[in-house]
Image: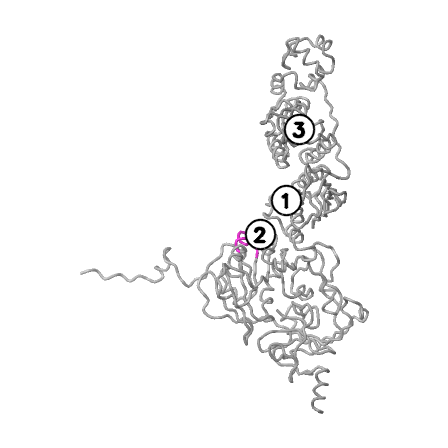
């Protein structure tokens, strides 16, 4: 009669070197930048925004708080003496707001690249002198160009972030971290589409500091004088 | 015929032949006239370039340069390192060079003219090498080697075996003194090359150049000379101009400007290549001239002992390249300006410009804004400066909003979340072209059902969208 198999403790099995647990996040070799939001840090591999890799943030509506999400990390990079670059931003940055957020204005460079946004991005990443590069590339950026950007960003401690539209979520991209942002009742809803390690199960709701009072709506005059006059005329007629 | 290249020599043309003989041997020969002033200028450019190795440079016309490297051996780490660097630099500029290194100037010169590409570190080895040289190598008048050959003295070493007094009587004092100088027994003072006060290097192109990219090679020689001159004079250059002289006598100028002063030839060359890639030449170029416009003394900064220099070219060098490609106004940093009008509060300025900026502590306090409640100041970071929030992004031009029964609409009805902030400013600008003009606006922070936060204002002309709280 064969001897009964001895019970093996689960912990011993897991402690073996040749057993890989599928529910762990990856740890990155390079240092990461703390994002300033504890729940987000818990979900990002390495505990913060990755350096030396592309990060893609996909938004379809602007004004949700997408830049405020990055501002603590950008302020930290700028205070440490690093240079930040904004490549082809679709609007004009307003200096008092950026300065009040903690970004040193003399080390914030705005590059109006136009059609050559991808080339500018590659040059800024490869130069090695910038701590953070935020770019708004054209919609027609293909995977080959993204691969070049990823190669340029490797080996350098630079935080590279590309802003694209949610329509590109289905197209392949070599960026190791892809996050889609949407608005939700409690704040900003982050859906991590791609990251190193286990895939994210459900979206993360973050509360971002927002201006004004969110508790109650202030009642103010609804119509401008022009429209009020035309409405009054329409009522008379 | 003075000199021929390899293809001509293969066809049978040699130095010393008459022009008609050479053309008869090879009818398709390209003949250039020898221009001695051009050779002199090229030698001076080379002397400027050699300033990066040593400050003591002498000209040995027609085609010789003497570099005194005894004082620089320790800096470069040995004579062979200097020799390698010199030869590499000459190869980059496409000069073919015959060289020799020896303890005395005249000895080194004779050895180089004889074509020995070797380093002779001590007097003894140098004298042994000199003894092997034929008597035709030094620049003596033609009858001296003939007389020496008649005596049976063919090599310089044989001259040492003959009594000096008799030799002096027969061939004169000059050659005998030269021998003594070469072996180190007599002083040999060389005229040092004086680096010019203002650098102006000129180069005439051997053929007319029609494409701008081909100018990069000639420009590289001039930039090498500029860099050596800057090293020798311990200066840094911030701007230089490349003047192009065209075929029809007209002149044009190509300014090269760095974001920070530097003596590095590579940075100027990269900038020049970027400019040349965009340049269209209407008329072929005949000659180039490089002038250094803004130079400054090099600050004596001491290098930290244990720090490693960062790899990569750095932020400022990369921005120069971007500026050369996209235009001067495409690469900017931001500065604040004391103005209530949002369009005027942000100024764009050049990277590295030292204009005074208005910091958060000196920004004007708004007279009419609501006083922020304590809880809200801690919540968002920009509450400390202004009475109310300022958005991160401003639209290029205010966008008019549609108005429905319940107010302004932007992808849905907008909820107003703050009281109105009245900005009235700019009466002095009213009517001027290009200025913001007189503004009377009530600004509100609004949110739409999609979750977007906007900064809108109400004007006499209606509701407008002006900023986004991204």
Q: Residue furthest left?
A: A1
> What chain does mark 2 sit on?
A
Q: Which residue is mark 2?
A: A126
Q: Is residue A49 above or below residue B273?
A: below
Dot 2, how many residues are within 10 Å of its Cα: few (below 14), some (14-19), or many (20+)?
A: many
Residue B6 location, quadrant: top right
Q: Which residue is mark 1?
A: B304
Circle 2 sits in a helix, a strand or a loop, which is it? helix
Please tell me whether mark 3 or mark 1 is closer to you in this view. 3
Span colored in magenta: A150-158
Residue A200 position, x and y percent, is 46, 67
The disc at residue A86 is none
Labels 1 and 2 positioned on one and the same chain? no
What distance separates the C-alpha of mark 1 from that of mark 2?
A: 25 Å
Along the line of sight, the residue nearer the viewer: B205 or A155: B205
Please tell me whether mark 1 or mark 2 is closer to you in this view. 2
What distance separates the C-alpha of mark 3 from that of mark 1?
A: 27 Å
Residue A104 position, x and y percent, is 67, 59
Residue B10 position, x and y percent, is 58, 27
Residue A232 position, x and y percent, is 71, 88
Circle 1 sits in a helix, a strand or a loop, which is it? loop
Dot 3, how many residues are within 10 Å of its Cα: few (below 14), some (14-19), or many (20+)?
A: few
Q: Quadrant of the N terminus of chain B?
A: top right
The disc at residue B70 is 3
């Amino acid at each position: 009669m064969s001897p009964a198999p001895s019970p093996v403790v689960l912990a011993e099995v897991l402690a073996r070197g040749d057993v890989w647990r599928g529910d762990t996040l990856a740890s990155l070799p390079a240092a990461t930048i703390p994002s300033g939001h504890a729940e987000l840090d818990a979900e990002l591999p390495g505990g913060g925004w990755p350096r030396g890799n592309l990060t893609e943030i996909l938004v379809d509506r602007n004004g949700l708080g997408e830049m405020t999400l990055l501002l603590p990390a950008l302020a930290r990079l700028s205070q440490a003496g690093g240079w930040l670059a904004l490549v082809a931003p679709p609007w004009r940055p307003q200096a008092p707001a950026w300065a009040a957020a903690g970004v040193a204005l003399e080390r914030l460079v705005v590059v109006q690249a136009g059609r050559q946004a991808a080339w500018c991005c590659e040059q800024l990443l490869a130069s090695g002198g910038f701590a953070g590069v935020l770019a708004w590339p054209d919609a027609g950026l293909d995977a080959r160009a993204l691969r070049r950007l990823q190669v340029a960003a490797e080996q350098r401690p630079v935080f590279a972030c590309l802003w694209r539209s949610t329509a590109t979520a289905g197209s392949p991209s070599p960026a190791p971290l892809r996050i889609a942002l949407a608005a939700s009742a409690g704040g900003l809803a982050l859906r991590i589409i791609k990251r190193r390690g286990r895939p994210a199960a459900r979206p993360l709701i973050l509360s971002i500091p927002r201006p004004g009072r969110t508790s109650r709506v202030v009642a103010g005059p609804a119509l401008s004088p022009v429209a009020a006059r035309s409405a009054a005329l329409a009522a008379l007629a | 015929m003075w000199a021929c290249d390899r293809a001509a020599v293969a066809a049978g043309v040699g130095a010393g032949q008459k022009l008609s003989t050479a053309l008869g041997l090879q009818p398709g020969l390209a003949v250039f006239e020898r221009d001695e002033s051009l050779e002199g200028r090229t030698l001076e450019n080379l002397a400027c370039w050699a300033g990066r190795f040593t400050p003591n440079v002498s000209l040995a016309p027609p085609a010789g340069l003497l570099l005194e490297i005894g004082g620089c051996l320790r800096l470069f780490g040995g004579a062979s390192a200097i020799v390698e660097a010199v030869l590499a630099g000459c190869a980059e500029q496409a000069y073919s060079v015959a060289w020799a290194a020896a303890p005395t100037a005249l000895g080194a010169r004779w050895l180089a003219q004889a074509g020995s590409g070797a380093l002779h570190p001590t007097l003894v080895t140098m004298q042994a090498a000199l003894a092997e040289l034929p008597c035709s190598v030094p620049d003596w008048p033609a009858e001296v080697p003939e007389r020496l050959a008649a005596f049976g003295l063919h090599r310089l070493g044989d001259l040492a075996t003959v009594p000096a007094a008799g030799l002096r009587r027969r061939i004169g004092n000059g050659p005998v003194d030269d021998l003594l100088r070469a072996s180190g027994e007599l002083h040999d003072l060389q005229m040092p090359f004086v680096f010019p006060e203002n650098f102006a290097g000129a180069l005439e192109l051997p053929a007319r150049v029609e494409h701008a990219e081909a100018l990069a090679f000639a420009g590289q020689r001039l930039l090498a000379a500029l860099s050596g001159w800057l090293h020798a004079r311990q200066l840094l250059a911030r701007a230089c101009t490349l003047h192009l002289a065209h075929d029809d006598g007209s002149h044009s100028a190509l300014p090269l400007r760095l974001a920070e002063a530097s003596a590095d030839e590579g940075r100027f060359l990269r900038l020049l290549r970027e400019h040349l890639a965009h340049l269209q030449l209407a008329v072929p170029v005949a000659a180039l001239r490089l002038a250094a416009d803004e130079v400054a003394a090099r600050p004596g900064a001491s290098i930290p002992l244990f720090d490693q220099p960062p790899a990569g070219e750095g932020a400022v060098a990369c921005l120069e390249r971007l500026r050369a490609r996209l235009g001067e106004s495409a690469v900017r940093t931001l500065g604040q300006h004391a103005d209530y009008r949002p369009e005027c509060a942000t100024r764009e300025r050049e990277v590295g410009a030292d204009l005074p900026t208005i910091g958060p502590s000196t920004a004007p306090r708004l007279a009419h804004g609501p006083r922020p409640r304590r809880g809200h100041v801690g919540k968002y970071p920009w509450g400390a400066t202004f009475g109310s929030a300022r958005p991160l992004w401003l639209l290029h031009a205010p966008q008019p909003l549609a108005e429905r029964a319940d107010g302004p609409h932007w992808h849905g009805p907008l909820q107003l979340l703050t009281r109105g902030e009245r900005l009235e400013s700019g009466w002095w600008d009213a009517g001027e072209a290009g200025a913001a003009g007189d503004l009377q606006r009530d600004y509100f922070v609004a949110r739409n059902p999609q979750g977007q936060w906007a900064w809108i204002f109400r004007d006499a002309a209606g509701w407008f969208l002006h900023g986004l709280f991204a």
